[in-house]
Structures are given as structure tokens and as C-alpha cells.
Image (spheres, rainbow, N blue to C red):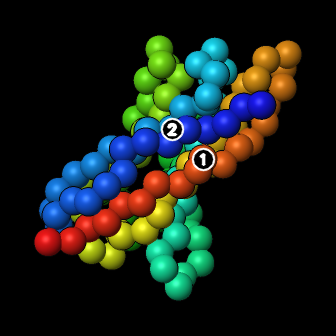
Amino acid sequence: QVQLVESGGGLVQPGGSLRLSCAASRSVFSINSVDWYRQAPGKERELVATMSSGGFSYYADSVKGRFSIPRDNTKNTVYLQMNSLKPEDTAVYYCYAEVDVGGNLLRKYWGQGTQITVSS
């Protein structure tokens, strides 16, 4: 069974940077497209950023200009690069990615979520 594994969360001061990674549990499986969501305490899960397989990108107004989605195809890994972090960015972040599992099959999976806390 394929899983998406996230890493890179933690505590950071306002103005700092973090990079989250999202990779399939089996490295032979590549990620076509990815959505990054976040959920703050007491709030609904919200879409933060998207990168399609064709290179289309979307960023929520709240993160535009500060977040980006680089990828390393050699590692079949996508990232959420977060700069100039603010306390309001504090949330659990999830990747939701379309994975090529072979045999022309594309499946979407959720990562396990990782906590980002922005605080001084």
C-alpha cells in the first residue's frame, strides 16, 4: 500500500523559513501533482497551494509570494517552501498528491500531516 510521508515540520520564529517534504513511501512511485492544505485549531482545512503535473500553480492569497512548491524529480519528492512565516501560518499541514503507481494508474493520497508552529 502506498503512503505519502511528510517531514520537515517544527517550531520556527516569525520571519523564519521551513521546508516540508512529501514523498511516496515507495520511491519508485512518482508524484504527478500536489495540493498542500493546512488546518489550524478550530478551523476548517484550507487549500494553501497547488502544483499540477503540467506546471500550473495556485497559491492562496494569504501565502502568495511567501510559499512555493519546488520538486526534486530524482527523489520523487515535492516540497512546500515556506518563507517569511507568520504566527497565523501555525497549523497542521497536509500534502494531497496524485501518485503514479505504475500500470497507467494514478491514485491520490493524503500525507499524515505535520505540525508547523510559528512563535517567538
- For the point 84% across and 26% down, which residue is it? 105
What type is the residue that disc 2 sits on?
A: Cys
**Residue to which mark 1 is pinned:** 111
For label 1, the SS is loop
Counting from the top left corner in percent of width and height, residue 44 is at 59, 78
Residue 77 against residue 20 in the figure, above or below: above
Image mark for residue 100: none
Nearer-the-camera pick, 56 or 96: 96
Which mark sits nearer the N-terminus, 2 or 1?
2
Q: Are marks 2 and 1 in contact (CB under 8 Å)?
A: yes
- For the point 54% across and 82% down, which residue is it? 43
Q: Indicate left or right for 39 with 66 as reference.
A: right
Counting from the top left corner in percent of width and height, residue 67 is at 35, 53
The quadrant in which residue 107 appears is top right
**Residue to which mark 2 is pinned:** 22
- For the point 31% across and 66% down, which residue is it? 117
Counting from the top left corner in percent of width and height, residue 84 is at 20, 60
What type is the residue that disc 1 sits on?
A: Gly
Residue 92 against residue 74 in the figure, above or below: below
Residue 25 visible? The answer is: yes
Q: Indicate left or right for 80 with 120 as reference.
A: right
Q: Quadrant of the C terminus?
A: bottom left
